[in-house]
Image (cartoon, rainbow, N blue to C red):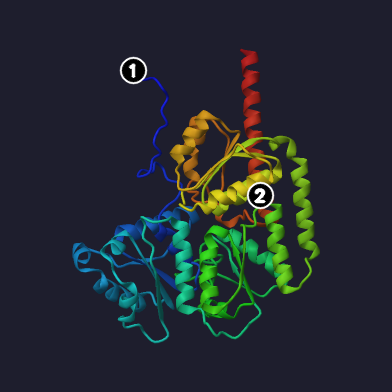
Amino acid sequence: MLDMTPKKLAARKALRINPAKTCQPVGAMYAALGVHRCMPHSHGSQGCCSYHRTFLARHFKEPAIATTSSFSEGACVFGGGSNLKKAVKNIFDIYNPDIIAVHTTCLSETIGDDLNTLIQQLDIPAGKIVVHTNTPSYVGSHINGFANMMSGFIKYLSEKNAIPNGKIGIFPGFVNPGDMHELKRIAKLLGVKYIMFPDTDGTMNSALTGHYEMYPKGGTTIQEIRELGGAQHVLALGEITSCTPAMDLKRKCGVDFTALPLPIGVEATDRYIMALSHLSRREVPAEIEEERGQLLDIMIDSHAYYGDKRVSIAGDPDTVLGLAAFCLELGMKPRYMITGTPDEKFSKKAKELLLKYGVTDCIAKANTDLFELHQLMKNKPVDLLIGGTHCKYIARAEDVPFVRAGFPILDRYVHPYMPLVGYRGAMRLIELICNTLLDRQDRDAADKDFELVM
């Protein structure tokens, strides 16, 4: 006789289907592109570097410059030391960066190349710098690679006994250039002296000038990274992304930091602004107060269209937490919050956030994938899906309104220039969410009218 008793299926441990993340070197490369006149260098095969460059170029719609050690079969057996030495010489001779930021790939990590020793053996031209970090692709995600590259710069450059400069360090987290621009704009309105690190505003959203510039004017300068050692305080935005480099700076240079959520929505933006105001001892200007009032007005005006809607959110951990917090402020209720980054701090932060708003039926998971999200949404549907481009297949299959937000967005334009952070970013999010729901409402109404005619 067959046993028909329902059995609990074993959780998938060794397999990910359509993961909600990409590999560490992508994040490391993006962080390095936020440093002025820096050449990211991929210590591994040419194919890895090409993939990482293509991934960033498709999201930002800008060239993502990078070089590679171009491992061959010989390097796989005997190590990539010789490749790195030749590469560094060629890079300085041909491309003339001020600094090369080396990150590893699966291959160089697996064969065990000791980059610290290899870099000490390099013949580096006077006035030039080479830094490195380890970014094994089979551990963590692009978020970890971004944080590790920041730590690499800090360990090599930030000065332990730097002269106090009274500046506030702003670690923006893994966000778009438009977000970094908005964070800086708010700091400037408050009259704050700051160092943003890294800063891709001006490197991955540079203007068309009629001629190609390999190193645009933007990016955190080498001197500014050194000066982080003398900063008054650091604001680590995105508690999962920015805390690691902030702790490394504190250990090395004794600079205290405050970990804050990404300033998405009202409360998180309030916390960012008040932290700047407190540290700089400056009053919040009327212009910022007016923006906040305009945001609240928009939220009230449009509340009827998104109040009590159930929403599913996927993407990077800090972004998902920020988007969920704003959805809760709008009166929406997250039903699923998922990220591919393996960090259980995400689930803990999500539970704290949901408990604050009395939401008890939301599933928040780290180290999962979009396949699992799709299965969850089949069992219990939602009114709206928010996430990167790859979520569109779920939205299409389940006929769910879909808002693109976060990383990566490969099939739309302009998004890297437009912020999600700050009050202006919140206004943009309301526009995207509300108009997407209104489009669905209009479509459903048209379908009903058609059925009546027929």
Indicate whether 25 appears above or below 297. Answer: below
Q: Amino acid at mark 2?
A: Arg
Question: Residue 303: which quarter of the image?
Answer: top right
Of residues 364 and 431, the one drawn nearer to the viewer in this rendering: 364
- Which residue is drawn at the image coordinates 19% and 62% (left, top)? 73
> Residue 349: image x %, image y %?
59, 51
Q: Secondary structure at mark 2?
A: helix
Label drawn at residue 44: none
Upstream in sequence: badge 1 or badge 2: 1
Say which of marks 1 and 2 sits in front. 1
- Which residue is drawn at the image coordinates 45% and 77% (left, top)? 156
- Which residue is drawn at the image coordinates 73% and 69% (left, top)? 278
> Residue 243: image x %, image y %?
54, 64
Q: Tell whether 383 sits left or right of 6.
A: right
User: Label 2 belongs to which residue?
Assistant: 428
Question: Residue 188: which quarter of the image?
Answer: bottom right
Residue 175 appears in the figure: no
**Dot 2 alpha-carbon crowd within 10 angstroms: few under 14, some 14 to 19, many 20 or more:** some
In contact (CB < 8 Å): disc 1 and disc 2:
no
Q: Secondary structure at mark 1?
A: loop
Q: Tell whether 115 sits left or right of 273.
A: left
> Residue 153: image x %, image y %?
47, 73
User: Label 1 belongs to which residue?
Assistant: 2
- Which residue is drawn at the image coordinates 44% and 63% (left, top)? 28
**Marks 1 and 2, Cα distance to the nearest angstrom?**
56 Å
The quadrant of the picture occupied by the C terminus is: top right
Q: Tell whether 222 sits left or right of 446.
A: left
The quadrant of the picture occupied by the N terminus is: top left
Indicate whether 30 appears above or below 307. Answer: below
Q: Amino acid at mark 1?
A: Leu
